[in-house]
Image (spheres, rainbow, N blue to C red):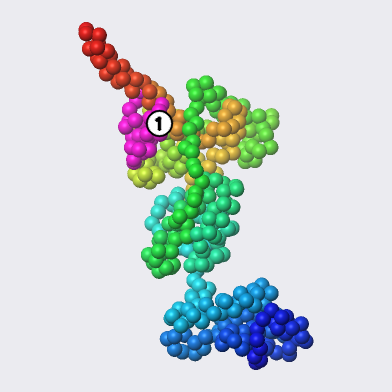
Amino acid sequence: MATIKISAPTVSDVLASALPNKTTFYFDTDLAGFGFYRTTAGTGTWFVEYRPVAGGSKKRLKLGRVGTLKASEAREAARKTIAHAGLGKDLAKDRSDERASGTIKELVEDYIAGKDMKQSTRDFYTVTMKTHIQPHLGAMKAVAATRVDVQRAHMKMTKTARYSANRAMALLSAAYVWGAKRGYVPEGLNPAAAIDKNKEEPRERYLTGEEMVRLGDALREAETIGIPHKASDSKHAPKEKNRTIYGRHVTGAIRLLMLTGCRLREILNLRWSEYDEKRGLLMLPDSKTGRKTVVLSEAAQAELDGLPRLGQFVIAGRSAGLPDEQPRTDLKKPWAAIAGRAGLDDVHLHDLRHTFASVGAGDGMSLLTIGKLLGHSDAATTQRYAHLHVDPTRAAANAIAGQIATALEGK
């Protein structure tokens, strides 16, 4: 141990001298407890020693590497540490607690595993965590993250997925709230709560009558002679004369999405046992909004009745009929091929649900009725179709204004 007046020149002289045969400590002559040590490899590290106000043994806190921190910066950090210790704040303990705490990845995973939620929601959260949160924030200690850290991560996520970046922030914020209630993080700590999120515009894409005709043609072609084969077509579908044929369960799923207004997973997870043929109903036990009854049209029921029954699920997947049968996971590749053939490359599968609602609104059905058909739990959700609901509103305006005009004319 040596005592020197620590400054930039004196430290440089020490580091330029011959390597020590053991770690050597140098203490400052002016600020008690402040110093640096040099290892046998020549590396210098700033530190400060202090005794907690509550008593106990002396503690040593590393401040940073010599060269990374200037002598003046290290001295100021040491001074603050000693001052905090005098006020009862133990920075060494805080750092120890921080190292012992879980990471953001662990916090979000515990939230997903421990929170009561639907399996579909759990799956979505898991993908969001792995795809967006983990790459940018996963290894960071949950108690150490700041709003600035999270905002920067959100900006990076935004470069590849604007809306998904917002969903990731909502998930992270919920995980912090949940974690605070269970002591995972300090109460009130939520660096994702005040993030500036990306502005979102509701998607409004509805098929026109002419587009529905083209889609119908493409569906018939897909299940008969097949869609002209492209490299991106499914490798699991049979090829005939450079065309890809898609079975009735694929085309049937797409038709049912259009004819019922159901969500994709409601159709893909639909079991034959949930289909009440006599009453023309689907009795869904666990939709996005809970238990749901879908009233089937004659066209939808005819589509269901025309599908081959290969297993417990209406839309048969690869494991249809097997003991461990699972529902089909998605329709992405078949839809891309069929929609592309119909010239509807900008149409998403969920837009078929919007189309169902838009046709109803355009025909003058009440928004209440449309909301019931779609299974909306909140009437406000159906209001997005209000601007399409023109005819009944115009009829009401004509009735009211007609009476007023008649009165004004003295008739």
Q: Amino acid at mark 1?
A: Tyr
| 10 Å crowding of disc 1: few (<14), some (14-19), many (20+) | many
Q: Residue 235 versus residue 347: which sits nearer the camera?
A: 347
Residue 7 lies, in percent from the top left, at 67, 81
Q: Of all residues shown, which one is farthest toward the bottom?
A: 1
Residue 373 among those drawn in magenta: yes
Residue range of the region highlighted in magenta in the rendering: 364-388
Q: Is residue 68 left or right of residue 264?
A: right
Look at the image and tell me whether residue 1 can be seen.
yes
- Picture quarter with the N terminus: bottom right
Residue at far top of view: 411
User: Which structural element holds mark 1?
Assistant: helix
Name the residue rendered at 50%, 43% in the picture.
199
Q: Is residue 231 left or right of residue 61?
A: right
Give coordinates of residue 381: x percent, y percent: 38, 38
- What residue sits 56% from the left and 46% below the top? 161
